[in-house]
Image (tube, grey):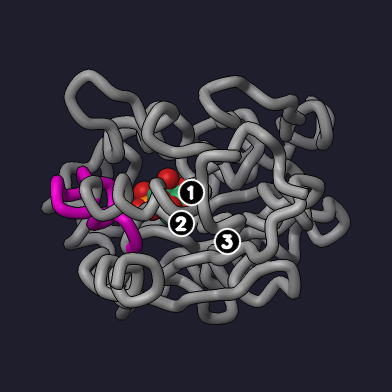
Amino acid sequence: MVSSTFADRPIKKLVLFDVDGTLSPARQAASAEMLQVLSEVRKKVVIGFVGGSDLKKIEEQLSVLGHTAKDDFDYAFAENGLTAYKMGKELSSQSFIGWLGEEKYKKMVNFILHYLADIDIPVKRGTFIEHRNGMMNVSPIGRNATIEERHAFNAFDKVHKIRATFVKVLEEKFADYGLTFAIGGEISFDVFPCGWDKTYALRHVEDEGFEEIHFFGDKTYKGGNDYEIYTDPRTIGHSVTSPADTMKELRELFLS
Ligand code: M1P
């Protein structure tokens, strides 16, 4: 029996969406057309987003005038669900440092900073490590890179495998830490406890009695940050190639 909170939805299904590459171009705003399609879909089913970024950044991408993303989605999951809201109300969550401990966290930060200093790439900007509640985000170019700089880094990384090499080193060095290193976006990778991938968000909805839980994502291949939730037996996965592809599939599934 689905929670009475969603009594107005004729179809008792939950549809979850990755953000970057699925609802919007990476780190950019979703289009007005996408937000319109989502509001139509929301009249039929329960909707939510599951992003790797922190909530502030996702809200910049998904908010429209006078609304916040927390108002326009029934479930808002940032940092893979480590920050979670249902109908605008915050749900309980855990913290990465609380789980790992300050000493181990510091040891890893120190190692990463040394490694970053030795990486030779065309440009470096600022904010190479971003601490978030549920994860650490590491970027060789730095999170202050402009859109043009991030595209250039991404092209460079495809050839020189800067992030993949870095991740391999960390996986070996901190093998006993129980961590996952996930390359999800263009310029960085996320570090979080094993199991704290996007399937973490399902903990917040699995007792709600939805008939089906759908998930739309673009990085659904092994090693991508949508892979675990896309292949999870609790979800019906949809692999999309762009926001336009997401809209096309939503129209076919729920609006025709
Ligand atoms: O949502 C995918 C990723 O988006 C960003 O990655 P990048 O800045 O490298 O493009 C980050 O917020 C990252 O944490 C997230 O997984």
* Mark earlier in primary sequence (2, 3): 2
Callouts 1 and 2 close, C-beta under 8 Å = yes
Q: Does residue 55 sit above or below 170 in this rendering?
A: above
Residue density around tag 2, few if under 14, some if 14–19, many if 20 or more, within 10 Å: many
Reading the image, the residue beneath label 2 is 17
Where is residue 132? Give x, y as percent. 57, 31
Reading the image, the residue beneath label 3 is 182
Where is residue 95? Give x, y as percent. 73, 29
For the residues labelled 1 and 2, the Cα–Cα distance comes to: 8 Å
What span is colored magenta in the figure? Answer: 22-34
Q: Is mark 1 within 8 Å of ligand 1?
A: no
Reading the image, the residue beneath label 1 is 47
SS category of the residue bearing label 2: strand
Residue 36 in sight: yes
Residue density around tag 3, few if under 14, some if 14–19, many if 20 or more, within 10 Å: many
Q: Which amino acid does label 1 sit on?
A: Ile
Q: Is mark 2 within 8 Å of ligand 1?
A: no
Rendering quarter of residue 131: top right
